[in-house]
Amino acid sequence: MPRKSKKQYSFPVLKRKEIITCMKELQISITEADLKQPHEEKCKLMYASILEKLAGINVLTKQIPYDKLSIFEHPQLHEQSIISVRLICEMIKFMQKVGVHDFNISDLISPESQRTVRNLSAIINFARWQEQKHQIYVEKKSSIQSLDKKLKSITQQNKKLADEFVAINTKMNQEKPEIDKLNAEISELQNQFEFQHQEYQRKGEIAHHIKKEITKLKTTDQEKKIILENKMHEIHVLESKIVKSPQRIKKELKSLSSMIQNEKILISTRNQQLNYDVNKFKQLTLLKQSIQRRCEEMKRIDAIKNEQCVKLESQLKQLQNSKNSIEKELKSNIKKYKVMNMALNNKKAEYAALQQDHETMKQEIQIKNKQINDLKEEHSKKRLLKQTQISSLEKRIEEKKEAIQQLLKQHKHCVQQCAAKYRQLLEAMDSYHQSLHQCVDQW
């Protein structure tokens, strides 16, 4: 005889002890005897608690709507049957999700040990898988929530930085005409300073030239004074030596007096020129001092403007650095945002796939509900037909009962007749056996 090949499942079939420990973890009390010889009520309670724990469906305590109960003539009689039907439907759906597609009503009404062990193994495998996936789902959900929070904070920071950047740009644009004005003033002052410096240099050269001329004139004047003194001394010597005529002396005196007057006029003109040059030199010194003061003032103004420019340039550099850092942060945030967008799109795709699965499941549930409703209608029709059949059968049974009673009476009468005949036969058989024994003894 060829051996029957064992059916392969997508889940491992566990031992009874493992099933009992796993069910204890799920807070469902079950014994080894319940697995060896399963009973209907125990199986129903066990499967109902499994549905409540894993699927969140409470079949036993869920109230039946009054509209559905009002279909029946005696709704109290059908409550238990509706609960059991609901349990069967929910269990079939649940077991199909678990991976058992041949679960039927017999697993609840007349359960077998092997099939219950198989079903519980599938449920435990599904529970472990669900727990693992739930942990992954919780982790992913928390990570998505944290990423959403980070995204919100980053977007807020980006908005804040963008507003600051716009404000800085507007401030720069507002201050640009003032900066241009200051630059223009600085360039004008520089031009004026160069012009004044050139004039100062030119006037300094003129003053230097005048000083040279004054020194030259002083030296010539001193030389001429020395020559004059020498000549006067020579004249006195000669006068002392020579006896002069009064006319010649007069002439010489006149010539000398004219020469002296000329020299005096020359000296006075030279003195006037010297005074003029001294005054000019004083004015030049005053002008030089005023130019120096003006230059110092210009330098101070230039230093102040340079300080302002340096401050503005440092502010501009700081703003540019902050702008570059903000741009870098923006780029990094954009990259993060793109990565997060990708992750979100993936999650959305997964969610859309789950939604599609959910919609297909909903459609299947609607189809199953329609089938259940159709079955209910058929069941009600069949029940009505059966009730009519039962009433007709009851009538037939009563007729048959009456016929059976008559037949019983006839049968009793026949039995009595048969008993009488059997007695006669037994008596004949006894007489026959006795005669036979006698013949055998004689023989």
Image (cartoon, helix red, strand yellow):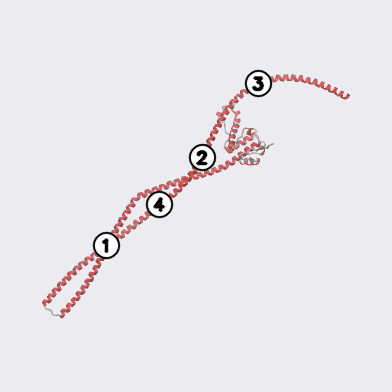
* Label 4, label 1: how far apart the Cα atoms are: 46 Å
* Label 1 residue SS: helix
Q: Is residue 355 left or right of residue 102?
A: left
- Residue 320 — which label? 4
Task: Please report the residue visible at 52 percent of the width from the left and 38 percent of the height from the top.
Answer: 353
Earlier-in-chain disc, 2 versus 4 = 4
Rendering coords of residue 328 (x, y %): 44, 50
In what quadrant of the picture does the N terminus appear? top right
Earlier-in-chain disc, 2 versus 3 = 2
- Tell me the amino acid under the disc marked 1: Arg
Q: Residues within 10 Å of mark 4 (few under 14, many from 20)?
A: some
Earlier-in-chain disc, 4 versus 3 = 4
Farthest residue to the left: give it: 247
The answer to whether any part of residue 285 appears in the image is: no
Task: Please report the residue visible at 28 percent of the width from the left and 62 percent of the height from the top.
Answer: 201
* Label 3 residue SS: helix
Do tag 2 and tag 4 residues touch (Cβ < 8 Å)?
A: no
Rendering coords of residue 142 (x, y %): 52, 44
Q: Give the residue pinned by disc 1.
A: 202
Q: Give the residue pinned by disc 2.
A: 351
Task: Say above or below: 180 vs 238.
Answer: above
Rendering coords of residue 361 (x, y %): 54, 35
Task: Say above or below: 314 vs 429.
Answer: below
Q: Is residue 266 left or right of residue 97?
A: left
- Tell me the amino acid under the disc marked 4: Gln
* Label 1, label 2: how far apart the Cα atoms are: 90 Å
- Residue 396 — which label? 3
| Between 145 and 263, the one nearer to me in the picture | 263
